[in-house]
Image (cartoon, grey):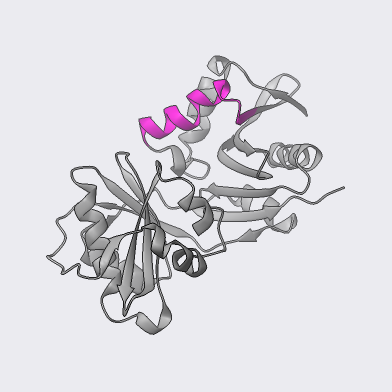
Amino acid sequence: MRIEKITDLEPWMGFIKEINSDPRFANPTIATPEMYERKIIRAVDDPEKLVLGILEDGIQQGLFVFSILKDDRYVEMLAGFSRSGEAYEAMAEHLLEHFPGFEADFVFNPANDLLTELLKRRGAEIDQEQQYMKLTGNPPAVDTEGIELLSEPWQEEYIALHNKDMYWTGERIVEEPDYYRVFIALENQRVVGYVDVSWPKDPNYICDLLVTEESRGKGWGRKLLAKAIEMNGSSGMELDVFTNNIPALRLYESMGFTRVEGRNTVSAFWTIPKA
């Protein structure tokens, strides 16, 4: 198979449409026109994006779009279009050759067994399926006392509490105030919870919500969500949650979020081996 860097998507548009119309291989991460424009169309002109085309005897077999953050040694697959196991293998070999030692994230269709099996063979860690939800209803009135925007006096506690098992750690979130808004829960002058929300976008995305184990069951999750929704104004809001996390699903549904079918994802994390 031949791999080439794609700088013109026009010859690939029919291939993209065909693969993305297949429920088994469709990309839920580009389900809206805005997402498609940002992650696919603009990628060929973005120096931090890599678009790879894979062909066999001149026939299109796969197209893969990656975000490449060289300073952070981080790769993220934004979208993959293929029904060929050999094309997925060629993509993985390209990453091995060009990005050894990088951390790679993949977010894709749970039905895509070809990519799932490839990543398993390569030693990737694969998460549980995540349910996509969007805010469609009006949340109930919730007292948000104890919830405030993150400010400098609380940054150290927030960073220490933050989930470390993700690219967007507390340190990185704090460094990007133009892209993320953080609400914290304060109990007895201690940070006992937080919610990270993208902004100012439409829709905004709830990236992470956490309440300490000892403070759970006291309504802090509802308070954090209520404040985030209140500050979100008229913009849309969306999130992903593990399908087996029943308490979280119930919490989000109680706050006006609705499950959306056909938008579920699964995530995989692969440390690309060094030669």
Image check: 146 left or right of 119?
left
Determine the residue positioned at 64% across, 61% down: 125
Q: Point out residue 159 in the picture as x, y percentages from the top left corner.
A: 49, 63
151 in relation to 109, above or below: below
219 in relation to 71, above or below: below
As rendered, which of 139 and 183 lies closer to the eye? 183
Q: Point out residue 55 in the picture as x, y percentages from the top left corner.
A: 71, 25
Determine the residue positioned at 46% across, 68% down: 157
Q: Point out residue 180 in the picture as x, y percentages from the top left corner.
A: 39, 48
Mark yes or no: residue 61 visible. yes
State the image quarter where residue 82 is shown.
Answer: top right
The part of the chain drawn in magenta is 32-51
Magenta region, main secondary structure: helix
As rendered, which of 172 and 137 lies closer to the eye? 172
As rendered, which of 126 and 174 lies closer to the eye? 174
| Quarter of the picture holding the N terminus | top right
51 in relation to 243, above or below: above
